[in-house]
Image: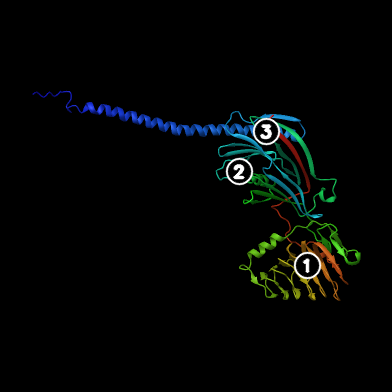
């Protein structure tokens, strides 16, 4: 038997086995690589397609915004607009999407709702992204936890202390195709309203105007409010709402012995005339936030109120305070914070120089039913009252200073043999004056008392124009 070994095959035939194996490995790598390209490439293509679709829809929504504005404000009877160029994504109308409320606080007849309207929306949904035409603007949410953003601004214009709100509301078919037809359904004017009394007329009265938006896009609405008005904007994330507070100009001078923030707010027993000088329907802002902030800062940062004060510090008492209040030569401003009712036996303010004063912040009621002040000038003492409290004067009572309670009821009874019962000024929401003598004496030194009522972070408002312009959007 002979054994033949090829000189060109030193491995004795193993080369013949490796060639098929290499081919198999090459084919396997090619298949795996191709699969990866298909998987990752498909994802990239899908992302790119979604981005293109959303971009086209965003352009369509801004076109819808522009053409709807023409219809809503009377420049055109009908407008048509293309919404999508393909079947990807869905377009529809939700008449109940979002709500805007405009309220006047502490107006002529108390708190009044000027407008409360459902906004409605034309929405485009594609994956995690939603676009909507709502309230005259276009909004976007991407479902990534970063809230919402404005694409084009809504119908909300603030300039030169004038707010113009020609709100556009959407009604129509729940489902739309690639085209929409927009028509005007009607306009309602809410403010000013000449058919009502002076409550809904310019210039604006009341302590503040609140505009509240509840919407999926509330954060973008709030950001718009902050950018365009520099107003005081607050958010309630639990209810998807943003609110902007607008404040009418208010009189920072105190030039009456009695005044009410409510029109016809003074009632005098026997229908006598109110004491002179007086005023009704005066716009003074609430001080609730200031009082609550003072209470929050105490007691850790404040001294305990013991009755006798000789240093310019902040003093705190929790519950009803019924002791004496004696302030003697403090050499600075004194602040007293009462987280409860303030019912002093007596008040004695002495040697407070003209550049300083004593401020008392009261969370609940103020009751004067003792002999009252002994010494002190009217400009030396100011008592600021939370809207949850009332002010009562009973029996032989006297107060020298300024009581500032613009959202509280004041009930003044008795008076007895002490005169005057008030020397300085008293500001309430409403006021009942009963008894005899109830002698009131104005002290002009309180006119320029500084209570820090100006709020730089709140937009001032003098004139308000609120209308709704309803449009109907259909697929025909």
Specify few, some or many for label 2: CA neighbours under 10 Å numbering under 14, 14-19, or 20 or more. many
Query: Tag 2's secondary structure?
Result: strand
Q: Residues within 10 Å of mark 3 (few under 14, many from 20)?
A: many
Dot 2 or dot 1, earlier in sequence: 2
Drawn side of residue 334 relative to residue 250, left or right = left
State the separation of the CA atoms marked 2 and 1: 46 Å
Question: Along the polypeptide, which appears first: circle 2 or circle 3?
Answer: 3
* Visible residue check, residue 24: yes
Point out residue 42 in the picture as x, y percentages from the top left corner. Answer: 47, 32
Above or below: residue 70 compared with residue 100? above
**Taking 121 as reference, is 401 above or below it?**
below
- Residue 321 is situated, as x and y percent measured from the top left of the image, at 71, 73
Residue lying farthest to the front in this orientation: 174
Mark 1 crowd level (few <14, some 14–19, many ≥20, 10 Å Cα): many
Residue 368 position in % (x across, y down): 78, 72
Is 51 or 458 nearer to us in this picture? 51
User: CA separation, marks 2 and 3?
Assistant: 19 Å
Give above or below for 376 relative to 162.
below
Front residue of this view, candidates 162 and 242: 242
Residue at mark 1? 391
Instruction: Write the residue at 53% across / 31% down.
Output: 49
Quarter of the rendering occupied by the C terminus: top right
Q: Locate residue 50: give its quadrant.
A: top right
Percent x, y for residue 228?
68, 44
Q: Which residue is mark 2?
A: 148
Q: Residue at x 31, y 29 (%)?
A: 24
Marked residue nearer the N-terminal end (1 or 3)? 3
């Amino acid at each position: 038997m002979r054994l033949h070994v090829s000189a060109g095959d030193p491995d004795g035939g193993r080369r013949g086995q490796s060639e098929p194996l290499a081919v198999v490995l090459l084919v396997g790598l090619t298949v795996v690589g191709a699969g990866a390209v298909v998987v990752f490439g498909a994802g990239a293509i899908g992302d790119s397609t979604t981005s293109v679709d959303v971009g086209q829809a965003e352009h369509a929504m801004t076109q819808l915004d522009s053409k709807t504005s023409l219809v809503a404000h009377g420049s055109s009877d009908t407008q048509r607009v293309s919404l999508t160029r393909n079947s990807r994504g869905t377009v529809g109308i939700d008449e109940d999407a979002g709500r805007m409320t405009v309220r006047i606080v502490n107006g002529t007849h108390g708190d009044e709702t000027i407008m409360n309207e459902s906004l409605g929306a034309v929405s485009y949904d594609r994956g995690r992204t939603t676009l909507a035409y709502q309230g005259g603007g276009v909004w976007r949410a991407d479902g990534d936890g970063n809230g919402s953003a404005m694409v084009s601004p809504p119908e909300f214009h603030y300039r030169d202390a004038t707010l113009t709100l020609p709100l556009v509301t959407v009604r129509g078919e729940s489902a739309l195709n690639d085209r929409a037809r927009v028509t005007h359904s009607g306009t309602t004017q809410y403010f000013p309203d000449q058919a009502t009394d002076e409550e809904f007329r310019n210039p604006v009265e009341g302590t503040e105007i609140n505009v509240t938006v509840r919407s999926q896009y509330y954060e973008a609405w709030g950001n718009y409010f902050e950018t365009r008005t520099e107003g005081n904007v607050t958010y309630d994330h639990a209810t998807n709402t943003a609110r902007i507070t607008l404040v009418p100009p208010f009189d920072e001078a105190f030039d009456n012995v009695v005044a009410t923030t409510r029109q016809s707010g003074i009632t005098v027993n026997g229908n006598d005339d109110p004491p002179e000088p007086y005023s009704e329907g005066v716009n003074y802002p609430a001080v609730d936030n200031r009082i609550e902030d003072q209470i929050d800062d105490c007691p850790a940062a404040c001294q305990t109120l013991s009755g006798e004060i000789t240093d310019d510090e902040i003093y705190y008492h929790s519950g009803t305070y019924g002791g004496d209040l004696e302030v003697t030569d403090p050499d600075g401003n004194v602040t007293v914070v009462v987280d409860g009712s303030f019912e002093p036996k007596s008040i004695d303010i002495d040697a407070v120089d003209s550049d300083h004063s004593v401020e008392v912040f009261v969370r609940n009621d103020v009751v004067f039913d003792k002999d009252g002040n002994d010494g002190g000038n009217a400009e030396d003492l100011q008592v600021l009252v939370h809207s949850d409290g009332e002010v009562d004067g009973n029996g032989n009572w006297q107060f020298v200073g300024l009581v500032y309670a613009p959202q509280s009821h004041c009930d003044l009874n008795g008076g007895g043999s002490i005169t005057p019962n008030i020397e300085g000024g008293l500001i309430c929401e409403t006021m009942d004056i009963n008894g005899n003598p109830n002698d009131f004496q104005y002290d002009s030194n309180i006119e320029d008392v500084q209570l820090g009522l100006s709020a730089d972070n709140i937009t001032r408002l003098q004139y308000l124009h609120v209308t709704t312009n309803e449009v109907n959007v259909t697929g025909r």
